[in-house]
């Protein structure tokens, strides 16, 4: 019911704008997002951003002079609903491309449907498995786990840390991150002294942190998305732990700071540059776009923009650019021209795709940040 309602509302809004345009048949682009449910803090800003950007595109004449028709379905972070949504978009709505899903597990569950249908999917999720090995029809806009882990380990090495502990969530995002951590921590010359896991619905991780504390690590790396990492931050303080705590880019929004409260102070993480857009140097190629996006989002929705909404922004922009570059909204042409995109400045980084690279970002998409006085600060 929620899925149909959100789809209908989003479709009605965009069609209202589209009817004012002269032009050919609408270009139908679908999206499967976790607008409600446990990952709504990720999916809602993605939905908001797509609605805002689609309206802007239509006001500016559409794509190739044709109106854009966005069809947004809510999977509520449920894998079965993601599968059903994907099938509806492919078989009923006949979309030329799909954006999302929001979460890694749902993306991994529906990927093969898009290969079979020969329709490009541009995921907003982070797991490296989405694009490695490369599937010709699957792309993603979220920065990869590998680059986030490398950013953390680069910082840890500079601090002289030798022994590291990890605590990861048992969902798709956490499992993917854990695999990369277990590979890169020893490869980077560190000793992995503890490897703990928690469930997505767990409300206390004191037991895992107590085990980690007994292993005497120099630093702890937590891999998950809200609310789990905020619980871990609070449990750490309650246990009197002073061991430095790194978070993943999965918590790079003000929501995490709100959930963790004072326990967020001093935590470190790799984040997309949107979190610190206002204090980036003027020479940064992303700064102008980031500041404008943040301003537009705040004006439209009366809340701060987040990196997660940026994944949606980039996904739609990439499809738009691919359609314009090929002068065609045919799914095969979109796929082919996505692979030709070079140096496209986005919210999540500067994208350069190829037949061998379907994320298009490198480690430069991240900046190490810390939390000071309840806000983000760039680590110098």
Image: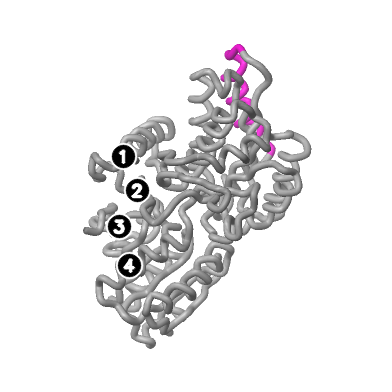
Locate residue 232 relative to residue 6 in the image: left or right: left
Main SS, magenta region, reads helix
- Is residue 31 visible in the rendered structure shown here? yes
For label 4, the residue is 154
Task: Confirm or deny contact between disc 3 and disc 4 (CB under 8 A).
Answer: no
The outermost residue toward the bottom is: 214
Q: Quadrant of the N terminus?
A: top right
Task: Confirm or deny contact between disc 1 and disc 4 (CB under 8 A).
Answer: no
Residue at image point 56% right, 53% down: 356
Tell whether position 255 is magenta: no
For label 1, the residue is 287
For label 3, the residue is 369
Q: Quadrant of the C terminus?
A: bottom left
The correct choice, above or below, for 156 with respect to 325 in the image is below
Badge 2: residue crowd in 10 Å (few <14, some 14–19, many ≥20): many
Q: Nearer the viewer, mark 4 or mark 2?
A: 4
């Amino acid at each position: 019911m929620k899925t149909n309602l959100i789809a209908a509302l989003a479709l009605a809004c965009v069609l209202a704008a589209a009817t004012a345009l002269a032009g050919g048949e609408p270009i139908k682009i679908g999206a499967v997002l976790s607008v409600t449910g446990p990952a709504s803090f990720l999916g809602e800003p993605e939905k908001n951003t797509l609605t805002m950007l689609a309206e802007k595109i239509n006001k500016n004449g559409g794509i190739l002079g044709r109106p854009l028709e966005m069809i947004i379905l809510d999977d509520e972070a449920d894998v079965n609903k993601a599968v059903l949504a994907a099938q509806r978009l492919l078989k009923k709505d006949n979309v030329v491309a799909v954006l999302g899903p929001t979460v890694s597990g749902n993306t991994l569950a529906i990927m093969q449907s898009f290969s079979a249908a020969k329709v490009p999917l541009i995921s907003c999720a982070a797991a490296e498995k989405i694009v490695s090995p490369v599937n010709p029809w699957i792309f993603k806009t979220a920065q990869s786990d590998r680059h986030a882990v490398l950013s953390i380990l680069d910082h840890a090495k500079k601090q002289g840390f030798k022994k590291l502990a990890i605590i990861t969530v048992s969902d798709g995002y956490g499992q993917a991150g854990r695999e990369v951590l277990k590979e890169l921590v020893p490869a980077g010359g560190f000793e992995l002294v503890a490897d703990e896991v928690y469930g997505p619905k767990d409300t206390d991780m004191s037991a895992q942190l107590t085990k980690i504390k007994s292993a005497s690590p120099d630093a702890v790396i937590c891999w998950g998305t809200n609310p789990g990492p905020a619980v871990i931050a609070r449990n750490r303080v309650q246990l009197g732990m002073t061991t430095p705590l790194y978070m993943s880019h999965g918590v790079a929004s003000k929501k995490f700071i709100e959930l963790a409260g004072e326990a967020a102070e001093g935590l470190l993480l790799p984040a997309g540059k949107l979190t610190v857009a206002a204090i980036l140097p003027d020479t940064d190629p992303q700064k102008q776009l980031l500041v404008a996006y943040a301003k537009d989002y705040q004006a439209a929705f009366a809340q701060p923009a987040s990196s997660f909404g940026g994944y949606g922004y980039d996904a739609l922009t990439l499809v738009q650019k691919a359609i314009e570059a090929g002068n065609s909204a045919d799914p095969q042409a979109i796929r082919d021209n996505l692979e030709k995109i070079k140096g496209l400045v986005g919210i999540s980084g500067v994208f350069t795709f190829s037949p061998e690279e379907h994320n298009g970002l490198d480690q430069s998409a991240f900046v190490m940040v810390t939390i000071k006085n309840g806000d983000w600060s760039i680590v110098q």
